[in-house]
Image (cartoon, rainbow, N blue to C red):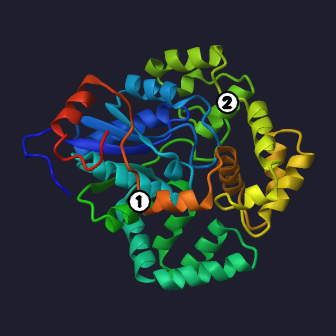
Amino acid sequence: MLKMPADSHRAVGLVTEYNPFHNGHLHHLRESRQAADADIAVAVMSGHFLQRGEPALVDKWVRTEMALRAGVDLIVELPFPWACNSAPYFALGAVQALNALGGIDALCFGSEAGELAPLQACVDLLVARADEFARGTEDLLRQGMNYPEARERVFQALGEGDPSVAALATANNILGIEYLKGLRMTGSDIQPLTVRRVGAGYHDTGPREDRIASATGIRKMIAEDQEFIRYLPDPVLPPFLEALALDRRLDTDHLHRLLLAQIFRGPDHLRRLYQVENGLENRLLAAADGSADYDSLVDESKARQYTRTRIQRILSYVLNDVTAEDMAAFLETGPLYLHVLGASERGRGFLGRCRTLRRLPL
Protein backbone atom coordinates (compact mmCIF):
# COMPACT_ATOMS: atom_id res chain seq x y z
CA MET A 1 0.00 0.00 0.00
CA LEU A 2 1.28 3.49 -0.85
CA LYS A 3 2.29 5.62 2.13
CA MET A 4 1.90 9.33 2.72
CA PRO A 5 5.01 11.58 2.65
CA ALA A 6 6.89 11.77 5.95
CA ASP A 7 5.81 15.36 6.66
CA SER A 8 2.08 14.66 6.22
CA HIS A 9 -0.64 14.37 8.83
CA ARG A 10 -1.20 10.96 10.41
CA ALA A 11 -4.63 9.37 10.05
CA VAL A 12 -6.23 6.63 12.12
CA GLY A 13 -9.06 4.47 10.82
CA LEU A 14 -12.03 3.39 12.94
CA VAL A 15 -14.69 0.82 12.08
CA THR A 16 -18.01 1.92 13.53
CA GLU A 17 -21.78 1.76 13.64
CA TYR A 18 -22.54 4.61 16.07
CA ASN A 19 -26.05 3.37 16.81
CA PRO A 20 -26.10 5.87 18.48
CA PHE A 21 -22.77 7.62 19.18
CA HIS A 22 -22.20 7.43 22.95
CA ASN A 23 -19.55 8.16 25.58
CA GLY A 24 -17.82 4.83 24.98
CA HIS A 25 -17.38 5.78 21.32
CA LEU A 26 -15.93 9.13 22.38
CA HIS A 27 -13.43 7.31 24.62
CA HIS A 28 -12.48 5.04 21.70
CA LEU A 29 -12.05 8.04 19.38
CA ARG A 30 -9.78 9.89 21.80
CA GLU A 31 -7.73 6.84 22.75
CA SER A 32 -7.31 5.89 19.09
CA ARG A 33 -5.98 9.32 18.16
CA GLN A 34 -3.50 9.11 21.01
CA ALA A 35 -2.42 5.51 20.31
CA ALA A 36 -1.82 6.30 16.63
CA ASP A 37 -0.40 9.77 17.26
CA ALA A 38 -2.97 10.89 14.68
CA ASP A 39 -4.65 14.22 14.09
CA ILE A 40 -7.12 12.83 11.52
CA ALA A 41 -9.79 10.27 12.46
CA VAL A 42 -11.53 8.42 9.62
CA ALA A 43 -14.54 6.23 10.37
CA VAL A 44 -15.86 3.49 8.12
CA MET A 45 -19.48 3.36 9.29
CA SER A 46 -22.38 1.04 8.54
CA GLY A 47 -25.24 2.62 6.62
CA HIS A 48 -28.90 1.96 7.35
CA PHE A 49 -28.40 -1.75 8.20
CA LEU A 50 -26.04 -3.08 10.85
CA GLN A 51 -23.82 -6.09 11.47
CA ARG A 52 -26.31 -7.75 13.82
CA GLY A 53 -28.98 -7.57 11.09
CA GLU A 54 -31.15 -4.76 12.42
CA PRO A 55 -31.87 -1.46 10.72
CA ALA A 56 -30.22 1.39 12.63
CA LEU A 57 -32.23 3.31 15.21
CA VAL A 58 -31.73 6.55 13.23
CA ASP A 59 -30.53 6.95 9.66
CA LYS A 60 -26.92 7.18 8.54
CA TRP A 61 -27.13 10.96 7.98
CA VAL A 62 -28.11 11.65 11.60
CA ARG A 63 -25.40 9.31 12.83
CA THR A 64 -22.87 10.98 10.55
CA GLU A 65 -23.75 14.40 11.97
CA MET A 66 -23.33 13.01 15.48
CA ALA A 67 -19.88 11.63 14.61
CA LEU A 68 -18.73 14.91 13.07
CA ARG A 69 -19.87 16.87 16.12
CA ALA A 70 -17.93 14.43 18.34
CA GLY A 71 -14.70 15.03 16.43
CA VAL A 72 -14.52 12.40 13.70
CA ASP A 73 -13.07 14.06 10.58
CA LEU A 74 -14.30 11.82 7.78
CA ILE A 75 -17.10 9.23 7.61
CA VAL A 76 -17.16 6.73 4.73
CA GLU A 77 -20.00 4.24 4.35
CA LEU A 78 -19.39 0.50 4.71
CA PRO A 79 -21.63 -0.92 1.96
CA PHE A 80 -24.57 -3.18 2.81
CA PRO A 81 -23.02 -6.53 1.68
CA TRP A 82 -20.30 -6.13 4.32
CA ALA A 83 -22.09 -3.98 6.92
CA CYS A 84 -24.91 -6.51 7.27
CA ASN A 85 -22.89 -9.72 7.36
CA SER A 86 -20.93 -12.00 9.66
CA ALA A 87 -17.78 -10.77 11.41
CA PRO A 88 -15.25 -11.99 8.78
CA TYR A 89 -17.02 -10.17 5.93
CA PHE A 90 -17.79 -7.09 8.04
CA ALA A 91 -14.14 -6.71 9.02
CA LEU A 92 -12.72 -7.51 5.58
CA GLY A 93 -15.00 -4.97 3.87
CA ALA A 94 -13.96 -2.28 6.34
CA VAL A 95 -10.26 -3.04 5.82
CA GLN A 96 -10.73 -3.01 2.04
CA ALA A 97 -12.39 0.42 2.28
CA LEU A 98 -9.58 1.85 4.42
CA ASN A 99 -6.95 0.40 2.07
CA ALA A 100 -8.70 1.90 -0.94
CA LEU A 101 -9.07 5.33 0.66
CA GLY A 102 -5.30 5.72 0.93
CA GLY A 103 -3.34 7.67 3.53
CA ILE A 104 -4.55 5.65 6.55
CA ASP A 105 -1.61 4.96 8.87
CA ALA A 106 -3.32 2.86 11.54
CA LEU A 107 -6.52 0.97 12.31
CA CYS A 108 -7.45 1.15 15.97
CA PHE A 109 -10.24 -1.02 17.36
CA GLY A 110 -11.64 -1.59 20.82
CA SER A 111 -11.24 -5.03 22.38
CA GLU A 112 -11.75 -6.78 25.66
CA ALA A 113 -8.15 -8.03 25.44
CA GLY A 114 -6.70 -4.52 25.23
CA GLU A 115 -3.51 -5.81 23.57
CA LEU A 116 -2.64 -7.26 20.19
CA ALA A 117 -0.57 -10.30 21.20
CA PRO A 118 -3.39 -12.72 22.18
CA LEU A 119 -5.49 -11.62 19.22
CA GLN A 120 -2.56 -12.09 16.83
CA ALA A 121 -1.98 -15.55 18.31
CA CYS A 122 -5.55 -16.44 17.40
CA VAL A 123 -5.02 -15.20 13.85
CA ASP A 124 -1.83 -17.25 13.53
CA LEU A 125 -3.70 -20.37 14.63
CA LEU A 126 -6.64 -19.72 12.32
CA VAL A 127 -4.37 -19.21 9.31
CA ALA A 128 -2.01 -22.10 10.04
CA ARG A 129 -4.83 -24.62 10.60
CA ALA A 130 -7.51 -23.17 8.36
CA ASP A 131 -8.48 -26.51 6.75
CA GLU A 132 -8.87 -28.28 10.10
CA PHE A 133 -10.88 -25.36 11.43
CA ALA A 134 -13.22 -25.41 8.42
CA ARG A 135 -13.76 -29.20 8.56
CA GLY A 136 -14.36 -29.25 12.31
CA THR A 137 -16.78 -26.35 12.16
CA GLU A 138 -18.71 -27.90 9.27
CA ASP A 139 -19.07 -31.19 11.17
CA LEU A 140 -20.58 -29.41 14.18
CA LEU A 141 -22.90 -27.34 11.99
CA ARG A 142 -24.26 -30.56 10.45
CA GLN A 143 -25.00 -31.75 13.99
CA GLY A 144 -27.22 -28.69 14.55
CA MET A 145 -24.84 -26.44 16.47
CA ASN A 146 -24.90 -22.73 15.58
CA TYR A 147 -21.82 -21.16 14.00
CA PRO A 148 -20.45 -19.13 16.97
CA GLU A 149 -20.64 -22.16 19.26
CA ALA A 150 -19.09 -24.45 16.64
CA ARG A 151 -16.31 -21.96 15.91
CA GLU A 152 -15.41 -21.62 19.58
CA ARG A 153 -15.54 -25.40 20.20
CA VAL A 154 -13.19 -26.16 17.30
CA PHE A 155 -10.90 -23.29 18.13
CA GLN A 156 -10.54 -24.41 21.74
CA ALA A 157 -9.71 -27.93 20.54
CA LEU A 158 -7.10 -26.70 18.06
CA GLY A 159 -5.60 -24.36 20.67
CA GLU A 160 -4.87 -27.29 22.99
CA GLY A 161 -5.22 -25.25 26.16
CA ASP A 162 -3.43 -22.13 24.87
CA PRO A 163 -4.86 -19.28 27.00
CA SER A 164 -4.82 -17.00 23.95
CA VAL A 165 -7.75 -18.87 22.43
CA ALA A 166 -10.03 -17.50 25.15
CA ALA A 167 -9.87 -14.24 23.22
CA LEU A 168 -12.21 -15.67 20.63
CA ALA A 169 -15.19 -15.76 22.97
CA THR A 170 -16.06 -12.04 23.32
CA ALA A 171 -17.72 -9.78 20.75
CA ASN A 172 -15.09 -7.10 20.25
CA ASN A 173 -12.19 -9.56 20.42
CA ILE A 174 -13.85 -11.59 17.65
CA LEU A 175 -14.03 -8.50 15.44
CA GLY A 176 -10.47 -7.57 16.36
CA ILE A 177 -9.21 -10.96 15.23
CA GLU A 178 -11.05 -10.48 11.94
CA TYR A 179 -9.56 -7.00 11.42
CA LEU A 180 -6.09 -8.50 11.88
CA LYS A 181 -6.94 -11.28 9.42
CA GLY A 182 -8.26 -8.71 6.94
CA LEU A 183 -5.06 -6.66 7.14
CA ARG A 184 -3.00 -9.80 6.57
CA MET A 185 -5.16 -11.10 3.71
CA THR A 186 -5.01 -7.80 1.83
CA GLY A 187 -1.28 -7.25 2.40
CA SER A 188 -2.08 -3.92 4.02
CA ASP A 189 0.58 -1.59 5.42
CA ILE A 190 -1.95 -0.14 7.87
CA GLN A 191 -0.68 -0.60 11.44
CA PRO A 192 -3.12 -2.44 13.76
CA LEU A 193 -3.71 -0.96 17.22
CA THR A 194 -6.18 -1.80 19.95
CA VAL A 195 -7.48 -0.04 23.05
CA ARG A 196 -9.22 -1.77 25.91
CA ARG A 197 -12.99 -1.50 25.86
CA VAL A 198 -14.26 0.26 28.98
CA GLY A 199 -17.64 0.35 30.69
CA ALA A 200 -20.59 -1.76 29.62
CA GLY A 201 -20.14 -4.90 27.56
CA TYR A 202 -21.46 -5.12 24.01
CA HIS A 203 -24.64 -6.95 25.07
CA ASP A 204 -25.20 -5.23 28.43
CA THR A 205 -28.57 -3.50 28.60
CA GLY A 206 -28.81 -2.01 32.09
CA PRO A 207 -28.17 1.59 33.22
CA ARG A 208 -24.74 2.32 34.68
CA GLU A 209 -23.11 4.80 37.04
CA ASP A 210 -19.98 5.52 34.97
CA ARG A 211 -21.77 7.36 32.13
CA ILE A 212 -20.75 4.64 29.68
CA ALA A 213 -23.51 2.29 28.53
CA SER A 214 -23.63 -0.01 25.53
CA ALA A 215 -25.49 1.08 22.40
CA THR A 216 -27.82 -1.87 23.01
CA GLY A 217 -28.55 -0.58 26.51
CA ILE A 218 -29.13 2.98 25.29
CA ARG A 219 -31.59 1.82 22.62
CA LYS A 220 -33.44 -0.17 25.30
CA MET A 221 -33.60 2.93 27.53
CA ILE A 222 -35.02 4.98 24.65
CA ALA A 223 -37.62 2.31 23.84
CA GLU A 224 -38.71 2.21 27.50
CA ASP A 225 -38.70 6.03 27.93
CA GLN A 226 -35.86 5.89 30.46
CA GLU A 227 -33.31 8.68 30.93
CA PHE A 228 -30.42 8.14 28.54
CA ILE A 229 -28.95 11.58 27.80
CA ARG A 230 -26.05 11.30 30.27
CA TYR A 231 -24.64 8.38 28.29
CA LEU A 232 -24.16 10.53 25.16
CA PRO A 233 -21.61 13.36 24.71
CA ASP A 234 -23.23 16.80 24.79
CA PRO A 235 -22.14 17.83 21.25
CA VAL A 236 -23.96 14.90 19.59
CA LEU A 237 -27.30 15.47 21.32
CA PRO A 238 -28.94 18.16 19.08
CA PRO A 239 -29.23 16.12 15.84
CA PHE A 240 -30.12 12.94 17.72
CA LEU A 241 -32.79 14.49 19.92
CA GLU A 242 -34.23 16.30 16.91
CA ALA A 243 -34.49 13.00 15.00
CA LEU A 244 -36.26 11.36 17.96
CA ALA A 245 -38.61 14.34 18.39
CA LEU A 246 -39.55 14.19 14.70
CA ASP A 247 -39.99 10.40 14.98
CA ARG A 248 -37.23 9.83 12.42
CA ARG A 249 -36.39 6.48 13.94
CA LEU A 250 -36.80 2.79 13.26
CA ASP A 251 -40.49 1.77 13.23
CA THR A 252 -40.54 -1.97 13.90
CA ASP A 253 -44.27 -2.21 13.12
CA HIS A 254 -43.64 -0.85 9.64
CA LEU A 255 -40.58 -3.10 9.29
CA HIS A 256 -42.72 -6.11 10.21
CA ARG A 257 -45.35 -5.28 7.57
CA LEU A 258 -42.70 -4.83 4.87
CA LEU A 259 -41.13 -8.17 5.77
CA LEU A 260 -44.47 -9.97 5.61
CA ALA A 261 -45.02 -8.61 2.11
CA GLN A 262 -41.64 -9.96 1.00
CA ILE A 263 -41.97 -13.34 2.72
CA PHE A 264 -45.45 -13.96 1.30
CA ARG A 265 -44.03 -13.74 -2.23
CA GLY A 266 -43.59 -17.46 -1.69
CA PRO A 267 -41.00 -20.20 -1.24
CA ASP A 268 -39.66 -20.12 -4.80
CA HIS A 269 -38.79 -16.45 -4.43
CA LEU A 270 -37.30 -16.90 -0.95
CA ARG A 271 -35.02 -19.76 -2.04
CA ARG A 272 -33.22 -17.35 -4.41
CA LEU A 273 -32.15 -15.10 -1.55
CA TYR A 274 -28.82 -15.04 0.27
CA GLN A 275 -28.59 -17.61 3.11
CA VAL A 276 -32.21 -18.76 2.73
CA GLU A 277 -31.35 -22.47 2.47
CA ASN A 278 -31.96 -25.91 3.97
CA GLY A 279 -35.71 -25.37 4.12
CA LEU A 280 -35.51 -22.02 5.92
CA GLU A 281 -38.00 -20.57 3.42
CA ASN A 282 -40.72 -22.79 4.88
CA ARG A 283 -39.83 -21.78 8.42
CA LEU A 284 -39.99 -18.09 7.44
CA LEU A 285 -43.42 -18.57 5.86
CA ALA A 286 -44.78 -20.37 8.93
CA ALA A 287 -43.32 -17.72 11.24
CA ALA A 288 -44.73 -14.89 9.15
CA ASP A 289 -48.18 -16.46 9.14
CA GLY A 290 -48.33 -16.50 12.94
CA SER A 291 -46.25 -13.46 13.88
CA ALA A 292 -47.73 -10.43 15.63
CA ASP A 293 -44.66 -8.18 15.39
CA TYR A 294 -41.02 -8.10 14.34
CA ASP A 295 -39.70 -9.76 17.51
CA SER A 296 -42.12 -12.68 17.24
CA LEU A 297 -41.21 -13.09 13.56
CA VAL A 298 -37.54 -13.39 14.53
CA ASP A 299 -38.28 -15.72 17.45
CA GLU A 300 -40.48 -18.05 15.41
CA SER A 301 -37.99 -18.14 12.51
CA LYS A 302 -35.09 -19.12 14.75
CA ALA A 303 -33.92 -22.72 14.88
CA ARG A 304 -31.23 -24.31 17.02
CA GLN A 305 -28.52 -23.90 14.38
CA TYR A 306 -29.29 -20.22 13.82
CA THR A 307 -28.44 -17.39 16.20
CA ARG A 308 -30.91 -14.55 16.57
CA THR A 309 -28.38 -12.24 14.91
CA ARG A 310 -28.15 -14.48 11.85
CA ILE A 311 -31.95 -14.61 11.51
CA GLN A 312 -32.07 -10.82 11.72
CA ARG A 313 -29.46 -10.57 8.97
CA ILE A 314 -31.37 -13.02 6.78
CA LEU A 315 -34.54 -10.96 7.27
CA SER A 316 -32.59 -7.91 6.10
CA TYR A 317 -31.63 -9.83 2.95
CA VAL A 318 -35.30 -10.77 2.49
CA LEU A 319 -36.38 -7.17 2.98
CA ASN A 320 -33.84 -5.87 0.46
CA ASP A 321 -34.35 -8.76 -2.01
CA VAL A 322 -30.65 -9.70 -1.99
CA THR A 323 -30.11 -12.81 -4.07
CA ALA A 324 -27.41 -15.36 -3.33
CA GLU A 325 -25.97 -14.74 -6.81
CA ASP A 326 -25.72 -10.98 -6.32
CA MET A 327 -24.20 -11.27 -2.86
CA ALA A 328 -21.55 -13.71 -4.08
CA ALA A 329 -20.55 -11.21 -6.78
CA PHE A 330 -20.39 -8.31 -4.30
CA LEU A 331 -18.25 -10.21 -1.80
CA GLU A 332 -15.87 -11.45 -4.47
CA THR A 333 -15.12 -8.02 -5.94
CA GLY A 334 -15.03 -5.97 -2.73
CA PRO A 335 -16.37 -2.39 -2.54
CA LEU A 336 -16.41 -0.73 -5.98
CA TYR A 337 -16.46 2.88 -4.78
CA LEU A 338 -16.23 4.93 -1.59
CA HIS A 339 -19.35 6.77 -0.45
CA VAL A 340 -18.45 9.79 1.71
CA LEU A 341 -21.22 10.47 4.23
CA GLY A 342 -19.63 13.55 5.78
CA ALA A 343 -16.38 15.38 6.40
CA SER A 344 -15.05 18.17 8.58
CA GLU A 345 -12.71 20.80 7.19
CA ARG A 346 -9.77 18.65 8.27
CA GLY A 347 -11.43 15.65 6.65
CA ARG A 348 -11.82 17.48 3.35
CA GLY A 349 -8.15 18.47 3.53
CA PHE A 350 -7.22 14.83 4.09
CA LEU A 351 -9.24 13.76 1.04
CA GLY A 352 -7.44 16.35 -1.07
CA ARG A 353 -3.98 15.32 0.11
CA CYS A 354 -4.69 11.61 -0.46
CA ARG A 355 -6.32 11.80 -3.90
CA THR A 356 -3.28 10.33 -5.67
CA LEU A 357 -3.20 7.37 -3.23
CA ARG A 358 -6.88 6.49 -3.63
CA ARG A 359 -7.67 3.13 -5.26
CA LEU A 360 -11.44 3.58 -5.70
CA PRO A 361 -13.51 6.53 -6.88
CA LEU A 362 -15.42 8.68 -4.39
Q: Is residue 254 visible?
A: yes
Who comes first in sequence, dot 2 or dot 1?
2
Q: What element does badge 2 sit on?
A: loop
Of the 4 image quadrants, the one containing the N terminus is bottom left
Q: Which residue is mark 1?
A: 333
**For the residue marked with disc 2, what is the amino acid?**
Leu
Residue toward you, 317 or 52: 317
Task: Indicate the position of residue 222 as horizontal and vertical percent values.
Answer: 68, 26
> Can residue 160 be spotted in the picture?
no
Measured as percent of width and height from the top left, residue 139 is found at 66, 83
Binning the other alpha carbons within 10 Å of mark 2 as few (below 14), some (14 to 19) or many (20 upward) gives some
Identity, as a three-letter code, of the amino acid under mark 1: Thr
Q: Residue at x 37, y 37 (%)?
A: 29
Seen in the picture, residue 39 relative to 282 is either above or below; the reply is above
- For the C terminus, the quadrant is top left
Q: Residue at x 52, y 85 (%)?
A: 132
The residue under label 2 is: 250
The location of residue 251, given as percent across then percent down, is 72, 29
Quarter occupied by residue 204: top right
